[in-house]
Image (cartoon, rainbow, N blue to C red):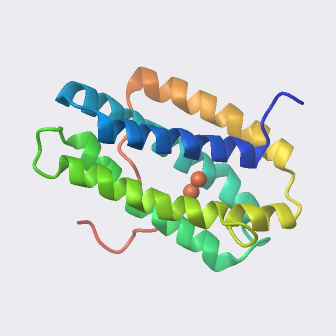
Amino acid sequence: MADQPDAIALLKADHRKVEDLFEQFEKASGEGRKQKIALEICLELTVHAQIEEEIFYPACTGKIDEDLVKEAYVEHDGAKVLIAEIEAGAPSDEFYDAKVKVLSEQIEHHVEEEEKRGEGIFAQAKKAGLDMDAIGAELAARKQALIANYKSSGTPKPETTTFTEVTV
Ligand SMILES: [Fe+2]
Ligand SMILES: [Fe+2]
């Protein structure tokens, strides 16, 4: 469908939205407002990571640099730990703002690994000839379903995919 974003456009739009939310958080004052923005960041990132892990990364696996995809899963898991902390915490907590800031820095790095010109995950996936329209449609449908679900029943506690050795 012509009016549907392809996979890369959809994922990039998610990245821009979260960057904007992080900026809003930095400027926000008042604990209620901060918490509202932080929880929106957590919801957006949870859904984004989930659709990438369920649909986009598996489509890339075997077609692009394997190390890069593995690192992306691990970077998601690192972010999920902070997301869980932020969701369980409150803006009055001593380290709340620091956790949101460090999450934004981790995400900035991760987004760069995905979007880097020529060699990032998206560029490699494009070169590998993935069907971005079909994957985009799948991502959009799954995203819509997850957001509806999480908005009605709450964002689930993040589950890590690659952190299997210890519980901290
Ligand atoms: Fe992403
Ligand atoms: Fe990602």
Which residue is found at the position 61% from the left and 35% from the top?
143
Which residue is found at the position 19% from the left and 42% from the top?
89
- Residue 51 point in image, percent of width and height: 61, 46
In-front residue for pair 144/37: 37
Which quadrant of the frame does ligand 2 lie within?
A: bottom right
Q: In this view, which residue lies farthest toward the top?
A: 152
Which residue is found at the position 19% from the left and 28% from the top?
30
- Residue 123 point in image, percent of width and height: 76, 64
Q: In this view, which residue lies farthest toward the front?
A: 27
- Residue 26 point in image, percent of width and height: 31, 42
In-front residue for pair 168/88: 88
So how many labels did they put on this image?
0
Instruction: Work out which quarter of the rendered image holds the C terminus and state it.
Output: bottom left
Establish if 11 lies above or below 146. below
The answer, for residue 42, to whether it is visible in the render is no
Q: For residue 117, what is the image quadrant?
A: bottom right
The answer, for residue 72, to whether it is visible in the render is yes
Q: For residue 145, what is the image quadrant?
A: top right
Establish if 104 lies above or below 168. above
- Residue 53 point in image, percent of width and height: 59, 55
Which residue is found at the position 59% from the left and 41% from the top?
14
Instruction: Work out which quarter of the rendered image holds the N terminus and state it.
Output: top right
